[in-house]
Amino acid sequence: MTEPPAFELRTHASMRHLGQDTWQQLLPPGRPPFLSFEWLDALERTGCVGEDKGWLPQHITLHENGVCVAAAPAYVKTNSEGEFVFDYSWARHSEGVLRAPYYPKLVLAVPFTPATGPRILVRADSDRARIMSAFARALPQLCAALPVSGAHVLFPSEGESAELTQAGLAERRGVQFHWTNPGYRDFDDFLSRMNSKKRNQLKRERREMHDRGVEIRALSGRELTPELVDFVFDFYLSTVEKFAWGRQYLCRELFEEVAKTMPDELHVVVAEQAGKRLGGAFNFLGKDALYGRYWGATHEVPFLHFNVCFYFGIEECIRRGLSKFEPGAGGEHKVARGFEPTVTYSSHYLRHRQLDAAVRDFLEREREAVTEHVAQSRAEGVLRPFEHAESIDEPSPSTK
């Protein structure tokens, strides 16, 4: 009689301990840039994550009869900062009402990155359903062994979330605003889906750059000189320092490192006026998507934010034939600029039964609220059904 396969979950204190070859073999085609070994490794080696930051690397691999069949980026957390799936009320209920410690906890996530993508990488020639089931079944044992209060999978794909829900984890839903490309010819083709009032509003905001002599361009990591790395770090810090909720998670060395190790996956937007840099954005460029991550301005210019973070990115997606643009978390104002509500997911396992029951009850009610919010946002959206149409107004000025 054949013995059933033996599964073993292992943890790794760094990406380098896990191994670049192992990680690369599990990455799916077209994976998002932030899942690359280079990015996750750079976060560790430049000190952006670590025990002192509340992000202790504890990456997971699943082995079947000694062969690695799955892996996930994972961290033991002693706080909830930089996650963008807010569980502060869960922590208060656990510690204040149930008298049960909530920290440390385990997160399967990309630090500081509220962007959807695979979180559990499964070997392509494996039975995915069986591997995902084995991975999920092993999580409670891992949480007890570490020990941590539970495990949280942040921003998995919809399909991955469904697999984890099937395995018994609690599903949470949130909302972001994404732009999708059904096949626009150019920016004016995109604008043709709006009514004349909204269309002209966007044109006025774009024209403001032209009238002020502001030029916006994109650079790859290969073009980032030490001076430009300084500029990127400066505009990143400007936003951190501008808002009370701002947190500096990244250091200059990280930007310098990834400009060398993953240059073609960086998309740095620079806005200039008469040779003076005004602000910019640090984006990830994927195989079929653009991901907005950080923005900042060293000089205040009306509508600079919309042009650098939204309109230029949309124009780049159309030019490159990319299917979507995720500009980051939050921002109801994105709806008026052609972004549409999109459901995001997370999956949760909690060891404390009373806490788990309370959270599941909350999530059921929250899902109803999310569904209503998405429906309302779609109803208030500015985009009409897509069809190629000639613009009835003057052509939109380019910001290139």
Image (tube, grey):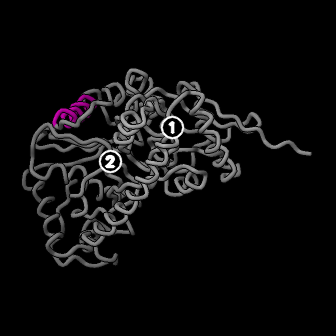
Question: Where does label 1 land, which residue?
Answer: 150
What range is drawn magenta here?
Answer: 228-242
Q: Is residue 274 above or below residue 375?
A: above
How many residues crowd around disc 1 within 10 Å: few (fewer than 14), some, or many (20 or more)? many
Query: Which residue is outermost to the right?
Result: 1
- Give the camera-side residue of 367 and 235: 367
* Sooner in the amino-acid sequence: mark 1 or mark 2: 1
As for residue 283 lying within the magenta part, the answer is no
As for residue 230 lying within the magenta part, the answer is yes
The x and y percentages for residue 382 are 24, 70
How many residues crowd around disc 2 within 10 Å: few (fewer than 14), some, or many (20 or more)? many
Q: Is residue 364 above or below residue 279?
A: below
- Give the camera-side residue of 378 and 123: 378
Amino acid identity at mark 2: Gly
Query: Which residue is outermost to the left?
Result: 212
The x and y percentages for residue 43 are 42, 29
Q: Quadrant of residue 121?
A: top right
Secondary element at tag 2? strand
Q: Name the dominant secondary structure of the magenta segment.
A: helix
